Structure formats: C-alpha cells, structure tokens
Image (tube, coloured by chain):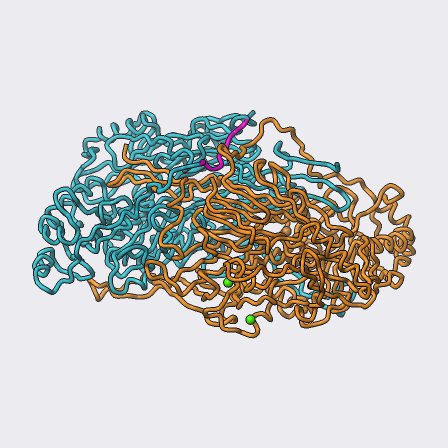
Chain colours: A orange, B cyan
Amino acid sequence: PLRGKHDDRSLVFADLTREEYLQVQQYMLKQRDLNIATKQITKPSENFLFLIDLSLPKKADALAYLDGKGNKPTREATVVVFHGAQGCIKEYVVGPLPSPKYHRDVTKERYKTELPITARTVTIGEYHLLFQFLETEVFSKLEKVMKESFDVGKDKKLNAFEQMPRGVRSGDRKTWISFFRDMSGMYIHPVGFEVLINHESVNASAWKVERVLYNGQYFDTVEELKQKYNTTSVKKIVYKESPDYGSLKPKNKPLQIGPQLFYAEGKRFSVSKNHVLYLDWSFAFGLSSLTGMRVFDVRFKNERIAYELSVQEAMSVYGSVTPGMILTKFLDSSIGIGRFAHELVRGVDCPYEATYVDTYRYIDVPTPIRFRNSICIFEHNMGQPLRRHFSDFFHNSYGGMVNSALVFRTITAIGNYDYMWDFIFYQSGSVEAKVHATGYISSSYMVDGSWKYGHQVAEKVLGNIHTHFINFKVDLDVLGVKNVFQTKDMEFVNVSLPWMPDHYAMVPQLVENQLKTEKEAALRYNTKTPRYLHIASNKTNRWGHQRSYRLQVFSFTGDHLPESQAEEKAMSWARYKVAITKHKDLEQTSSSLYSQNNIWTPAVDFSKYIDDNENIENEDLVAWVTTGFLHIPHAEDIPNTVTVGNGGGVLLRPHNYFDEDPSIHSADGVYFGPG
Amino acid sequence: PLRGKHDDRSLVFADLTREEYLQVQQYMLKQRDLNIATKQITKPSENFLFLIDLSLPKKADALAYLDGKGNKPTREATVVVFHGAQGCIKEYVVGPLPSPKYHRDVTKERYKTELPITARTVTIGEYHLLFQFLETEVFSKLEKVMKESFDVGKDKKLNAFEQMPRGVRSGDRKTWISFFRDMSGMYIHPVGFEVLINHESVNASAWKVERVLYNGQYFDTVEELKQKYNTTSVKKIVYKESPDYGSLKPKNKPLQIGPQLFYAEGKRFSVSKNHVLYLDWSFAFGLSSLTGMRVFDVRFKNERIAYELSVQEAMSVYGSVTPGMILTKFLDSSIGIGRFAHELVRGVDCPYEATYVDTYRYIDVPTPIRFRNSICIFEHNMGQPLRRHFSDFFHNSYGGMVNSALVFRTITAIGNYDYMWDFIFYQSGSVEAKVHATGYISSSYMVDGSWKYGHQVAEKVLGNIHTHFINFKVDLDVLGVKNVFQTKDMEFVNVSLPWMPDHYAMVPQLVENQLKTEKEAALRYNTKTPRYLHIASNKTNRWGHQRSYRLQVFSFTGDHLPESQAEEKAMSWARYKVAITKHKDLEQTSSSLYSQNNIWTPAVDFSKYIDDNENIENEDLVAWVTTGFLHIPHAEDIPNTVTVGNGGGVLLRPHNYFDEDPSIHSADGVYFGPG
Ligand SMILES: [Ca+2]
Ligand SMILES: [Ca+2]
Ligand SMILES: [Ca+2]
Ligand SMILES: [Ca+2]
Ligand SMILES: [Cu+2]
Ligand SMILES: [Cu+2]
C-alpha cells in the first residue's frame, strides 16, 4: 500500500521521449540555413547534429508550477550542433515541445564565449576517419613491424585507445593513440606502440602522424620507424601470445547460488513515468546524456528537501612515463556519462526483483536510441538495523527496526571504467549519493622508468597511478529556497568545575558558524574543514534550533592538479570538498561538454561561480560536493577493479530538521516488552 | 558445498565453556588463603571473584600448534579478584584447563604496577549499596522536594545514571549520579537532579554525599537543599508529566513487510564450535567479556592473513555545563564490551536466516551465564556488483559478479548506547571491521549555558556533544610474521614531455616509503598521513611487488582530548589513526579493565608501546586502528540514534598480495558474450 500519489508534474524533469527527439531532429533538419546532417558518419567538415537533450526549465518557473502557483513551463530541448563548415559549435534551445516552432542560439548566453570547433567531442564520424587514417598511414606502412611484433595481419588487428587532452594548448587536437591487443579487457593489454595524430583540421586530408612510439623509443615518422626497424637501432618487440587474463568468464561453475532478496509481500515502491514513490519519499528522475543521473523535487512526507541532486562530472588524472598517458586527464561528461548507462544485468548489477526502466537518448546517433533496463530501482534490506536498543537496566525491553532503503541506480561504462551511481533513500529521512568504480584500469606498456608511475599488474603491463574525482550537485531547499550555510564542530575549552572552581578541565564545546560569502564557503580539500556542514533554514524546529540538512562527505581523494597547470581550470570544482554557491539557472553544471577538448580554456570554469563572492545568507544555495579516491593499481585490479573500498559519496542527513527521528513512525519498527 | 574442513585447533581461541568457568570458580574458592566470595552482592570490603575469561596463549605457541609444529598450548584462564579486604586488585592465571591445578599472580607481569582497589569496576554488589545509600541518605531525606519536583513517592522512583571518571585524581572514587525519569529510554529523560557521592572507602558506612545539584543550583548537603527549598532561594522544578518520547513502540502497524534475504539453496558457510568456513575463508572466533568480539587465524585459500582482528576499546568524551557530564569520559572495556553482547533479534539485528551462536560469560556474576543468540553469522547480498564491466567497444560482452559477503556480528548495549560490530569477509580477499552506533544518546537537564554543549532535543533536555572513538587491533601476518610497514601516496612532479622536451607538465608519481620505527609509524590524527598504508612482506608477487594488505580507515572522529589532561593517558591510542607496534604477548590490548576508574594512572597507557621506539622492519607487526565520529546530537537522535552515517571502520584489502583478483575464481561470476 503506497502512501501519497504519483504526480505528473514530475514530467517537467523528464527526459525527452523518442517522439520528442524525432520532432526536434526534424525541426532542425528543416532549418535549411543551418545545413545540418544527422547521418552517423557525418564528416567533421560538415554540420552535425551531435546532441539533443532536455533543456531544464528555469527553477523559479518549475517551482511555481510544482507548487501550484504557475503554469507548466514551456518544454524545450537543448541541441548541440558541431558546425564543421563554420568552424564553431553552437548550442540551440528548441521549443516548444512536442511541436517545435522556434530555435535560439544560446551559446553566448550560456558560456559567455564562442565555442571553437576544436572543442568538440570526437564523433563516431571522426573516429571512422581516424581508423581509416591509421590503417592507411600507419598499419599498411608497417606490415612487417606489426606482424613480427604483434602478429597483426589480415585477420588480426590491434585496438586503439586514445588519450586526452589532445595536446598542450587551446586549439590543439593532437591525440596520442595507444594500441592494445584485440582481446577482452583490451585496456590491460597494451603492446608498446603509440602514435601521435594531429587531427586539428576538420579535413582529414590534412591530418598527420606527428610522432611514433615503439617499445619506448620515439620516431618522427612512420617511415623512420620502418627504416630503423631493419637496422639494429631499434629494440624489437618479439610477438608472444598473451594469456587471456582480461577475461571475465567464470572459471568455476556455480554450485550453490548466494543469498537473494525477495519481496514477500510485493514492492513497497512505485514508479510511474519519471516519478517514484517509496514510503515517505517521492521524487522525479531523469538521465542526462552528458552528466548522468539526477533526481528533482525530492520530498519526504511531501515536504521538498532537495530541488536537484545530480551527478556532474567524473574526472581522472593519470601518471605515466609513456606519452599515451603522461598527460591524461579524463573529463567524462565531455564524452557523456549518462550516454553510457547501458542495460543492467538482473541479479548482478541490481537484484532480480528490482524495477528496471528504459531510457532514450540522442547523442552522436542518427536516430534516438532506446536503452533497455538502464535504470534500476529497488528496496534493499541493508542487513543491519537502522536503529535498535536493548535495555537490561531498569526497563527490560527491545525496540528496533531493520534498515530497508530505496536504491536508485545507473551504471555507466565509459570506455574502460564502470561507475556505479546510487542515490539511496533511507527511512530516517537521509538521502545518500554514492559512486563506486569497477571495470578495467587503464594501463601502459612497461618501459624504463614505468615503476615510478604505478605497479606492474601483468607481463609487461603497468597499471598507472591515477585519481578519481567525482562532483555532485546538491541543491537542497530546506523549507523553501532561502537558506544559510552553517558549520558546526567541537573545540576543547578549559573550564573551571562549578563544584570545585579551582580545578580546571578541558571540556568539548560546540562551535557554530554561519558562513557569509561564496569564498568563505568554498572549502578546499587541502585545508581543515569543520566537521559538520549544514544547509539550514532560519526556521527552527520545536526545540528552537535551525532546521537543517547536514552534508557528510565520504572521500579518499588524492590531489587533483596544481593550479599552475592550464588544465586545472576545467576541473576547478575538484579544489573543494564542498563549495556553496548562490543558485543561478545559468550555473546549471560544474563542468561542460566542451571541457575535455578545450581543457585549457574551458567553456565552464567552476571557480568563476565563486569568484564574484556573492552573499550566501538567505539565498537559494547549491552545494557542489567532490569525492573520489586515489587509485594506485595493483595486481588485484586484474581483471577488474572491485567496488569494495573504491568509492565515495555524500550523505544528506536531517539535523534538527525534524523534531524527532521520522523512522519512529515506520511500520517496520519492532518492539518487545519484558517477557 | 563447503570448501575446506573445520579445524578443531581453532579451540585454542575459544571462550571458556560453562564447565570450564565452573572449574575455575571452584578452584579459586578452594584457595582458602585468598578468601574469595562469589555471591552476587559481595561487599566491596570482601574479596570478590569479578571475572573469569580466557587467557590467550602466547602467539608463538599458538602458531606452532596451528601450523603443526608444536603441541597444543596449555589452556588457561585469567581471573580477576577485587581484594577488598587487602585494598588491591589481582589478576591470576589459572590452569591447566579443564582441571586447574595452579594459579599465578600475574598482576605485576602484565601491568608493571600494583592495582589499587579504587581502580576496580563498580560491581553489582557496590551498586546495591549505592542504591541503598541513595535511598536512605538522599531520597528519604528529600521526600517533599522529590514529590513536588518529580512526583517521586512510594510507587514512583527516579533512575540513576552515573558518570565517569569518578573524580579528578588517582584514588578518587567520587561519582556524580544523575537522575532520570523512570520511563523507557531514561537516558533522554533527565530531571535536573544530580548527586556527588564519595564512595572511595570499601566500607559503605564511610560514604558521603559531597554535593547536590538541583535545577542548576549547587548545595553542599542534602540538608541544605531541603532547608533552602522551603525558602525562596531555590528555583523550584514543578512536576509535569512528560510525554513518552523515549518509547520505541511502533506507532504504525506493519501493512507490508520489507525486502527479506533468503538462501534459495542453503547456506554457503558453516559454523562448527568457534570455527567458521565460508567459501575461501576460514577463521576462529571468540568474545572477550571485556574487549568484545575477535577473530583469529583468519585465512583465505588456507593462507593466514591475520592472526588476530579484535575490538579493543570504545571511548567517548562529553561536554556539558552540568557536573554529571562535564568530566564524562567513558572507557567501555572497563565495564566490559563483550559483557553486553545480548541476544540478537531475528529480522532486525540480523537477517532471519542468519546462524545464531550462544556465548557464555563470567563477569560480575555468581555463576556463568549463557547469552543466547549473541553472535550472528550470515552471508549477505550487498545489493551491488562486487565487480562488473560492460563493453560496447570492439568486444560486446558483459562480465560481473554480485557482492555477497559473510558478516560476523555482535551488538553490545552498554547502558544507553548500542554498538553494532561487524567483521565482513569479501570474496575479493578483503576483510572489513566496522562499527555503528545506535541506541539512546546521553543527555542532561537544560540549565543556563547548556546550548554551548549541544542541542536541545526535547523539553528541558540537552543532547550533549560527545565523541565516539573506537580502537581495533589488526594483527596481520602477511606470509608469516616478519613484515614491514609501507606507505604509498601520490605526488605531482614537473616533468619534461619526452616528445617535446621544452614543454613541462605536472604528472602524478607514486611515492613509496618504508617506515622503520614505531615512532615513525605512529600516524597521528592531526597530521597529514600518506593515503595508502600497508603491512607488507618482503616476498613479492608474480609481478615483483611486495605482497601486502592495505589498511583503509573510514573515520569521522572529533578531537580525542588534549594531552595536557591527565586522563589522556588512558586513551592515548586515540592520538593515532594507525599506529604500528612490534608484537608482544604482553601488549595484548590497547586499554584495560582498570583504565576507567584509575584514568589518571591507567594500568595500560598505549603510548608506552611506542615509547621504546622499536625497529619495525621485518618484525611481527600489529596495527592499532582508531576510528569513530563526532556526535553533535540533534532532534533526530530521539528516540534513537540511527546507524546510517554514524560509524567507522577499517578495510583490509589485498594489494599485490595476489597475482590477480581472487574473485575471478568465484562461482558467482556471470558472463555474457556477444548475442
Ligand atoms: Ca556566485
Ligand atoms: Ca537550494
Ligand atoms: Ca614497542
Ligand atoms: Ca603481525
Ligand atoms: Cu581507478
Ligand atoms: Cu553518540
């Protein structure tokens, strides 16, 4: 039996439907002056409709509508066109859906700058040309080297894995491509062959091989390698078959299945369209092709607690002696995090009995694609009490309650890595955003000096040291949008004992502060931050304390990148464990689609949200939370990194928000009196 | 189908059986010269047999026996006698079990000092006298005050809750007793009446009321309060019925039960005596009445990874303006952590289908007591993959495995708080020690100045700020006992790019160190510690790296106590996130039974284990890990603190210990090839 009712107003946050994508696509194609192509292998020199995604309504409009004080906001799409013909990228807003009548170039409005075409994500169309280029300009010229070193021939190829950023300064589009054995888990099968391709021009005919690395030795051209290979000046790699250590095939047969979850009396949650009801909780959800999963209008007992909770960015910085990874800094939302939310496997990725939801996306495709079962929603028995007390003094009694919570999950497999994203809704009124990493590590071929950059994990394979940094947007609205940012901590104070005043003792006191500006509230990772961080209302609970939600960050991050580096601006959000900004519709994300390929002059530099140092007292506050972990790969990362211990997150917990623990009203409570 | 076989050699770590306790008790009673009493309300002035517990064998002896190289070590008990008649405490070793023939005073050997009788735990016998004393010296003299203020009368009492330490210097035994309404969850029902009792003498006739606190006002005697109460100089508390906000009785009826765990094909683990088998894991277990649960001889694929993993201490420091809590520093192992491992409730504390184990204890009792179902062991489906990868590039395939792990759990309800202790055994070769807090907070009656020390959580009730510090002993033996302590971290280094040497970039490098001495390896909480901590062997894995286990600490601790405070010596373990010592049989615990009541001159000062600064290279190393959290109570702690977010722990993970992730051999793996 469900409490509450589904609410179709959640649809203002819904991803576009298949029909809506098609309508927008058709509308854009009709704009003859834009001269847009949509075919899969559109060339970089043409104008390509790269992305169609929901354009979120303005928060004020959405709130007015949700709260019954305004009309439904106009539904609009964001369209990204790579104008290869004009040498720029444009973002358009197209509306109203479902039957678009207008489009508007919002590039300048959103990014305060033009977007150069070199900032674009590499499309399947460009990959197509790159692979052709590699074939004709590299492999066909090096048949002997490739055969002898890697057994490459008619029926055996190498796989390419490219590194980013593509160069060292704005405008560069020079990509080191590393080659891997064509085996499962190719990412841990490097062969020691890497090629630097300059593909800056939108005309593939202008592309060049700029450098070649073979077995740790550099060559200016393919020809140079070919020539020197036949002399003694090249240390040759002699082909040797490699064991299939990247395989995920089970090595043992199941004899007895493990513990399973079951709903003896059915599900206690319900999913209707993009709206979820679970006990006291309700929320709307969506999956941005770029930033990934997100929930909106999160309510507990019908009171809105958060307007938005969303994944923003997943970033990794690598260390290596090899060129393919020496500069690597991945910014996944530039490739698309939600884009890679594939089908979830029942019984492994989520319990069998979970509810699975399909999503539709339009990114780098000719037509919208359905991703079956790409979101799962389930209630899980956490295997522990949420609370309990046994009393054997004075009153013999027991009261407790098992911790059953709702999990909202996607898993995004972005190349080698799989990130598991969880939003968890607890009966105590807490919400948790969690991320875990699994999948394959990135690796490089062992050469002299490799051990400074990681550990060897297989024959001639180095698992390279790297960081994982994740950014979440947490737009809590505690009793409305006007909130303050509070910190609480302890401090030992020397006090005289009241009953023996000449005796002093150090006693912990509560230290509370209200931070007034964005700069004060940008809490850097390398500084000591107060232990309790709160988004609070000035309204008080029954006991006179400001009602608040506390942010508790779980993190094992390394260092992100020195600010001296030009690339740091594209990841400046990672400076802060928590940063609080005044909400702006135009500060929707902490990163952007254009950060990866123009990392030196990124379209979004998060630190600028703070630079204007606005007042954050009684304003609509947004918390940007960074978590992650330092990853020093080790043999046990082969074949896959395990989730246990490899994650981070943020727990949003009521702190004087209620007058008592709301779980006391749960029907899951159990009580025994004295027997 | 189980792998491996149960091994009775685990019994060297088994707690005493009922028969063994009785044999030891009878043996001690037969020693006429010791003149020992065992009755429940033995007086403090008599000699009381307080505790019988397993005396752990010397590690070298146990290892020799386990490894088939030595005889079974003699089984012995530790007996603690409070020699009230002699004014001291003695520890005896009694053996051999099951038929004791000798006893030996080991007090000096173990503690290098005599133990004064004032250092003893308050026994039920002493409580009995204390309650009598309160009745005759306080309540019976204050009938009018008690009736008018608290409705105390013939059929209605107040409950007492005492605070520790009992005074301010060695030898003190002066206890502030606070009074609480006789309702469920009394700990959150303070009434504003506290009494300081001097019970230093073992003769109750010498006990005195030294101070009285009523509604924030101090009185030197009960008589003074009585007298002034009838004048206008006392601000009176006028009795008012209090709502039953501490009740754990469900307020709603269950309509639909939540998700449950089931073993469709039976349990995949087995418990025989004190030995557990689970897939590749095996271990022995025990439950010390004092320090709590512990496991020994933890093996994975029959290779010993840890000799001991055990709970050591749970400590809390409180802040308050009221005398009852201004000095409070609880050291739970002095009362007994394992002592309070009560029956676990099926379906709440552990899943219904868990295996439940009884334990027997002898602490402050006249006869051994059975605690039914006080340990639970179950395999849990963690609701997430342990690892997975979906590949849509080049090779379309999916491989993954659900995270099913074995949980070994006790929950100890020590007065107001319930600690849930978990040791979790993962299929990836990791073991996790976790603790969560739930139960009732401690509270004090609101008076002027209270808000500096916490938050109000009910009418006239302050939830006092406090810390939770937990210490675990982690005696890893990585391929034998000779190990080293390694740290690993990252560091950005400015390097020239090999293919464009005039361009420099900051690239993360791996920084490894081997710490040589105990002082170097005592990693303080208030300093920056390297991110990776390893107990390593000098033996290498297949790829040439030292085989190691990494310690990953999850912690949200506050500050423990300034070292200027005399009481700090009894909790000096809390200075360190991780401290590494050379193993010694005489350094069995980081705290002691005698720490709480002689906190200023504790029998064990952990920092002394480090003071001799021994070399820790190629030695038998023990890691002492401190975790915990700062607790600023809030309304949602009423009635009970929830486990979510209120915990800490340490994850022991293989790091180059294996040549690959051992979970790849699990039969739980799932794989799909291209369809
Ligand atoms: Ca701003
Ligand atoms: Ca907000
Ligand atoms: Ca030492
Ligand atoms: Ca050891
Ligand atoms: Cu990683
Ligand atoms: Cu607490």
Q: Judge from the rendering whether residue A263 lies leftward or rightward of residue A57; answer left or right.
A: left
Where in the figure is residue B231, as x and y percent of width and height? 8, 63
Judged from this view, the residue extending furthest toward the bottom is A612
Dividing the picture into quadrants, the one containing residue B62 is top left
Where in the figure is residue A445, as x and y percent of width and height? 75, 51
Of A412 and A59, nearer the camera is A59
Q: Is residue B450 above or below residue B51?
A: below
Count of labels in the image: 0
Q: Does the image show residue B628? A: yes
Q: Would you say the magenta stretch is mainly helix, strand or loop? A: loop
Q: Which residues are magenta?
A: B256-264
Of B337 and A418, nearer the camera is A418
Q: Judge from the rendering whether residue A431 lies leftward or rightward of residue B318; answer left or right.
A: right
For the point 66% across and 70% down, which residue is it? A109
Where in the figure is residue B126, as x and y percent of width and height? 19, 42
Dividing the picture into quadrants, the one containing residue B548 is top right
